[in-house]
Image (spheres, grey):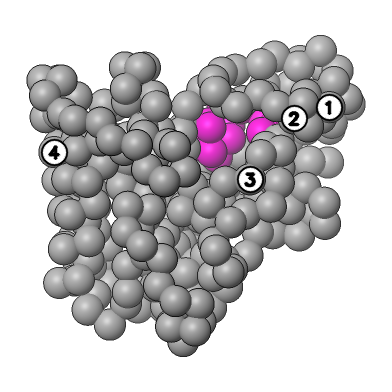
Amino acid sequence: MYKILQDQKLRNSIFDLLIEAGDKIMTYYRSETFETFQKEDKSPVTTADLASDEVISRGLAALTPCWKVISEEKALPEQKEQKQTDYFWILDPLDGTKEFLHRTDEFSINLALIHDDEVVAGYIYLPVFKEMYYGVKGHGAYQHIDHSEEKRLHVNSFSLADENLKVVTSRNHIDDGTRVYLEKLNNPNLIFMGSALKFINIANGKADYYPRMIQIMEWDTAAGQIIIEEAGGSLVNANTGEPLTYNKPGMINPYFIASGKII
C-alpha cells in the first residue's frame, strides 16, 4: 500500500504546498516583476518557475525525506542513481511558461509520484483559477474543493467515428504528425489550450481527445496521466497503445494520445 494513499494529513499538506507555490507564482504574474532566462534547450524559464520549484522542493524534502524530487528546473540525476530509486517525486513547478509569459492564464503546477516505472499519484494545481485536481492509483480522480469536499472526475465515452469530437491541442505545438491524426477525425471541434489544462479537460469530460506527436518530458505528462486514467480514460504511447512509463533514460516521452474512454 502506498504511503500516499494512507495518510490524509500528508495529502492535505501536499495540497497546501502547491497552493503556497501557486500564490508565489501569482505574485510575479500580477506584478510582472520577474526575469526571463533561456535554458540550454532554448526554452524560457522565469523567476516564477524557480520560486515555485524552491517552495515545492523544500516542502517535499520535509514531508517525504526518503523520496527524491526530480524537477524540470534542476539537473537530472545520473541514470544509475535514478534507477536505484523505488519512489520519487517528479515536478514541473510551472507548466506552461510560454502561457505565463503570454498572459493566457493557462499554466499549472504538475506533481506526480512515481513507483519504479509507473505513476501512482498525481496533482495538478491551476494558480489563476485556484483549482486543485488529483488522482491516486486505484482510488479515483477528483477535483479537490476544500478539505471537506471533493468532486469525482469522469471522462466521456465516445467512438473515434463520432462527429464533432472535442479535441484539445496546444496553442504552440500543432505539428504535421498531429495534423495527420486530426484529419482522420469526423469534423472535430478543436479547442486550443495551454499546459496541463488539456489533461484536466479530458478528465472532467469537457474534452475527448488529445494527440501529441512531439516529444515532451515525463514531468509534463505524469500527473495528467494518472488523473485521466483514474477518471476512466487513457494516456498511451501513440505507436504501441501502451500506457506511458516513467524513469526512462533522459526522461523523454514518446508521442502519445490522451483520451476519454474510446468505445
Q: Secondary structure at mark 4?
A: helix
Q: Kindly report the distance in space between the C-alpha atoms of the residues bearing marks 2 and 1.
A: 5 Å
Q: Earlier in the sequence, mark 2 or mark 4?
A: 4
What residue range appears in magenta?
198-210
Task: Return the residue at label 4.
Answer: 24
Q: Secondary structure at mark 1?
A: helix
Q: How many neighbours does mark 2 have within 10 angstroms: few (below 14), some (14-19), or many (20 or more)?
A: some
Residue at x 27% of width, y 62% of height: 11
Within the image, what quadrant is residue 164 found in? top right
Q: Is residue 170 visible?
A: yes
Q: Which amino acid type is marked by label 2? A: Thr
Q: How many marks?
A: 4
Asked if the residue at tag 1 contacts the one at tag 2, i.e. Cβ–Cβ closer than 8 Å, the answer is yes
Task: Return the residue at label 2.
Answer: 178
Q: Is residue 5 visible?
A: no
Task: Return the residue at label 3.
Answer: 215
Q: Position of residue 143 (x, y in %)?
A: 38, 42
Q: Earlier in the sequence, mark 3 or mark 1?
A: 1
Which quadrant is the C terminus positioned in?
top right
Nearer mark to the viewer, of 2 and 3:
3
Q: Position of residue 52 (x, y in %)?
A: 21, 46
Q: How many neighbours does mark 3 have within 10 angstroms: few (below 14), some (14-19), or many (20 or more)?
A: few
